[in-house]
Amino acid sequence: LCAGAGAGKGRTTACFKRVRRVHMLAGLTQGHCSLFGAWGGATANNHTLQLRALDWDMDGPFRDHPVITVYHANGPKENSFATVSFTGMIGALTGVSDQRLGISEIGVSYPDKTFGAQARVGYPFIFLLRDILQFDKTVDDASNRMINTQRTCDLILAVGDAKEKLVRGYEYSYHTLDQQDDINMRPKNDTWHFRLPEMIYWGMDWLCPGYTEVLGTQLRKHHGSLTPELAISDVVAVEGSGDVHIGVYDLTEGLFYVSFAAPRSSTGPLKAYARQYSLFTFDEMFGEAKPTGFLSTNE
């Protein structure tokens, strides 16, 4: 991020400004993405499952610099957590914590009037999502955090909680915070956004019939038998969402499936939903010893 930023004090200032601008991108561009949550009888083994599919910039540098970062708890008030993002990104777009919480997000370009006004001044959502992973123990903690923060742009968020055995959705804007589940999921439309027991889902936007109907149809097809493997092969891949990266979480079992878009140096399918996934377990990620020192950049 700081290549070509100069030298000395001027380099430090230029580097800081560049990093700050990069972290503003998510809130300004609000990428089109998809998510679902499924729990209880909607899944094969009564597990709590969650999708976060990121559809964003495929022309810029992001797909060439993917990274999974594991953060270790620094004291009893913090959680260990893992995020999927890009080199230099310290906010959270996709991730899970050792509290068996998971996060998902969709940028909204086609809201309805219930969203009200949005703003660009406030607490950036990538840091809100990071705070949920780093500090919150339950989905109710996350809800309270959203209620009390200075919200900004129009989003759909979701937080899964294996301890509470549910995934909660949120209509999120400067003006509105509306918590949603399988009973009150909106927008309500019996044709393209039909409600399913113990499931929530949104495809690419708030008002996006094409993607949302396909996502719902595939979830209905596998209702009662859904597994992470089926979500990967016959839900996300059929909807065609998640070009930059995808996270599929089994929060009950502590499994984290991740796929990335092909970097420019690679061959094979381009988009993440058509590529191979890697599987990480919570025990492996959070069981690693905490680093005891730092590598010197001068060596």
Image: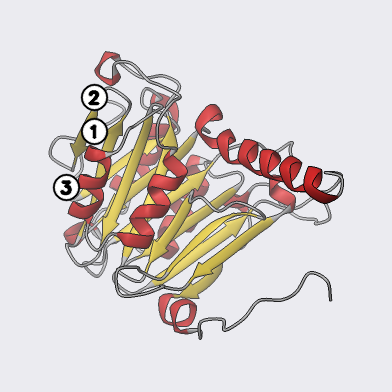
Pick the quarter of the image with the C terminus. bottom right
- Is 166 situated above or below 30? below
Q: Distance between the residues labelled 2 and 3?
A: 15 Å
- Give the class, few, some or many, for how many residues have Cα within 10 Å of label 3's Cα (few <14, many ≥20): some
Q: Are marks 1 and 2 in contact (CB under 8 Å)?
A: yes
Query: Which amino acid, mark 3?
Result: Pro
Q: Residue 289 carries which label?
A: none
Identify the element where label 2 is drawn.
loop
> Which residue does the image show at 37% across and 59% down from the upper left?
133
Q: Which of 165 and 194 is in front in this view?
A: 165
Identify the element where label 3 is drawn.
loop
Check disc 1 and report the residue beneath it: 194
Query: Which amino acid, mark 2?
Result: Asn
- Is 225 situated above or below 103? below
Q: Distance between the residues labelled 1 and 2?
A: 6 Å
Query: Which amino acid, mark 1?
Result: Phe
Q: Nearer the viewer, residue 253 or 17?
A: 17
Check disc 3 and report the residue beneath it: 197
Asked whether, in this view, residue 231 is left or right of residue 223, the answer is: right
- Provide residue 178's location: percent of width, then percent of height: 20, 32
Check disc 2 and report the residue beneath it: 189
